[in-house]
Amino acid sequence: MAYCENGFRKAIQIGIVIRDIEEALNRWCKLLGIEKPRVIETEEWEKTKAMYMGVPTRGRAKLAFIDLDNITIELIQPIDGPSTWESQLSAYGQGVHHIAFVVKDADGCAKKLEGFGGIREQEGLFEGGRYIYVDLLKSLGVRVELLQFFK
Amino acid sequence: MAYCENGFRKAIQIGIVIRDIEEALNRWCKLLGIEKPRVIETEEWEKTKAMYMGVPTRGRAKLAFIDLDNITIELIQPIDGPSTWESQLSAYGQGVHHIAFVVKDADGCAKKLEGFGGIREQEGLFEGGRYIYVDLLKSLGVRVELLQFFK
C-alpha cells in the first residue's frame, strides 16, 4: 500500500481544539504578525454525512487555518452535537487534537492504521474531499487525520 | 522582537510523550518503512541544569527523532524525576506535548509568550543549545518549545 506510506512522509496540518476560535485566532495572528484568516464552519450533516464512533452525528466545528512556512495550524472550535473535537475538549481541555496527512485512499490507509492499533473514530465529507480520524494515541501517541481529495 | 516572530514561521518538531519509546518507535518505523533511529537520553542535571516550575529537577527523558519530509516527530519517554513530560503523561496519557520553534533569543521569546498568557514551565541546556517550554494551552491551545542553538 505505497499510497499510504508516501502519504505519511509529510504532515500537512496540526489540528488544535480550542474553546473560542475568535479569541485564540486573534492571539495567534498577533503573535505571528499576520492578517486574520477567515473562520469557516463545517457543513450540515446532509452534506458531510459525518459519523462519530459509528453513528451519524450533527457535531460540527468552526475552523481557521494559519499557514506557517512548512505546516498549517488548524484551529477547531467544536459546535453542536458530539464529535471527536468536543470529546477531547471536554475530557482534556485545549490542546493538539491531530496531525493530518494527505493520502490517496483514505479507506485503505485507515485499514492499515487499524492494523497498528488505530480506532476509526470519526469521518465525513467536505467540499472536494473526505476525512477520517484514526485514534492512534495508545499505539503511536497521536491521532491521525487522513485527508483524501477527490479529483 | 523580530527574532521571535521570524522564529515562529517554521515549526520544526512535534513532540509526543509516550510510555515505552522502543515499542512506539518500532511501530512508527514500521508504518513509515524507515530504519529505526537511535534512542538517546537527556543528560544528568549537572549538565542540563533542568528547572521545572522554577525548581531544579532530575527529571529526564529518552528521546527519538523521526524525520518526515517537512517536520520532525520527537518521541519522548519521561524517566526519573518530575518534568513537564511526566506530568502530561500522568494526567492525560500519551499525546502531543509541544510544537518546537528555533529562535535566536529563547529568553526574549519566552517573555514575549508570557505576554500572551504563557507559563514558563521547564527549561534546560543540551549539547550546543538550550530549550524553554512555555505552556500556552489556555491561550493558544498548545505548548511551545523554544530552541536556541549556541554558535
Image (spheres, coloured by chain):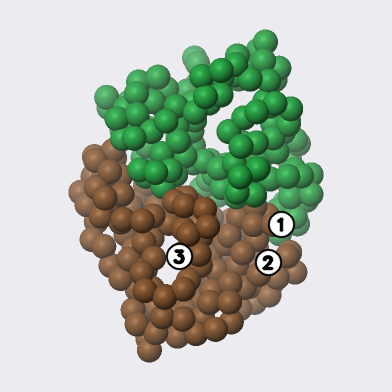
Chain colours: A brown, B green
Q: Residue furthest bottom?
A: A46
Chain letter belonging to callout 2: A
Residue type beneath disc 2: Gly
Q: How many neighbours does mark 2 have within 10 angstroms: few (below 14), some (14-19), or many (20 or more)?
A: many
Residue at figure coordinates x 40%, y 19% from the top left: B107
Q: Residue furthest left?
A: A35
Q: Which residue does the numbered mark 1 point to in the structure image?
A: A139
Q: Secondary structure at mark 2?
A: loop
Q: Nearer the viewer, residue A146 or A103?
A: A146
* In the image, residue B114 above or below residue A85: above
Task: Please provide percent x and percent y for residue B18.
Answer: 68, 45
Which mark is nearer the camera, 3 or 1? 3
In the rendered view, does B35 fall on the left or right side of B106? right
Task: Please provide percent x and percent y for residue B66.
Answer: 65, 44
Residues behind callouts 3 and 2 on a single chain: yes
Say if residue B99 shows up in the picture.
Answer: yes
Q: Which residue does the numbered mark 2 point to in the structure image?
A: A118
Residue at figure coordinates x 73%, y 65% from the top left: A117
Chain letter belonging to callout 3: A
Task: Please provide percent x and percent y for residue B38.
Answer: 76, 36
Disc 1 to disc 2: CB gap under 8 Å: yes
Which mark is nearer the camera, 3 or 2? 3
* In the image, residue A2 above or below residue A140: below
Q: Which residue does the numbered mark 3 point to in the structure image?
A: A86
Quadrant for the N terminus of chain A in the image? bottom right
Residue type beneath disc 1: Ser
Residue at figure coordinates x 60%, y 67% from the top left: A134
Disc 3 to disc 1: CB gap under 8 Å: no
Cα gap from disc 3 to disc 1, whole angstroms: 22 Å
Cα gap from disc 3 to disc 2, whole angstroms: 19 Å
In the rendered view, does B102 fall on the left or right side of B127? left
